[in-house]
Amino acid sequence: MPDREIHIPATGGSYILWLKLNRKRRISVGRLGEHLFQAGFYAYTGSAFGPGGLKARLGHHLKKVERPHWHIDYLKNIATVREIWFSDEPENLEHLWSNTLSQMPNARIPVIAFGSSDCACPTHLHFFPEQPSFDLFQRPATETSISRDIP
């Protein structure tokens, strides 16, 4: 797929980062330890309400990092970002979206507490053998507008 410019607002918002892992891999994820990640699609939910908003946070997520800071940094260094779904609504939707993903067909939790060490969610990372459709997710997720972009 050719590179193209992605238009992501600098306002705050919530997002789902879709990654594809082509083959199963054993990955060390910081304090969460080593885990086996199956080949397939991973949805990581997050929010970006700090300086630079979605543009800054997703800009970070689209780059490889030498020194991982967040749990997702370990996975994104070996997986390919396929899509980004986001909303620039001022309400933090990451927990609602994580719950919505967990209830979708074929969803599995690959690692407990991944990306959710600061909240009560069991995880912010969900595994799917095939990426579910945007429409299937959007209907139950929220009434607010959600955009998607493909890097």
Image (cartoon, grey):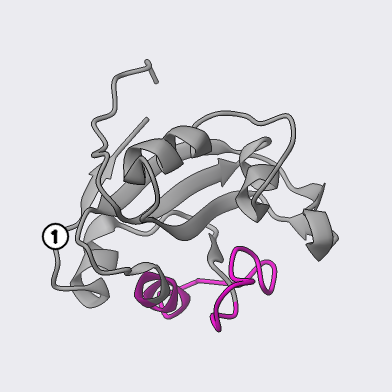
Q: Amino acid at mark 1?
A: Ser
- Look at the image and say whether residue 12 sits in the magenta stretch: no
Most common SS among magenta residues: loop
Residue located beneath label 1 in the image = 145
Residue range of the region highlighted in magenta in the rendering: 96-122
Question: Which residue occupies 35% across, 40% down?
Answer: 52
Residue 121 belongs to magenta span: yes
44 displayed left or right of 4: right
SS class, disc 1: loop
Residue 38 vs 140, above or below: the answer is above
Residue 40 pos. (x, y %): 58, 51
Residue farthest along the bottom direction in this orientation: 120
The quadrant holding residue 1 is top left
Question: Up-down: is 74 above or below 16?
Answer: above
Q: State whether residue 112 appears in this view.
A: yes
Residue occupying image coordinates x 13% and y 73%: 143
Q: Quadrant of residue 129?
A: bottom right
x 31%, y 50%: residue: 85
Query: Which residue shows up at 52% across the image and 45% down it?
Result: 19
Q: Position of residue 123 (x, y in %)?
A: 58, 72
Would you say residue 35 is visible in this rendering? no
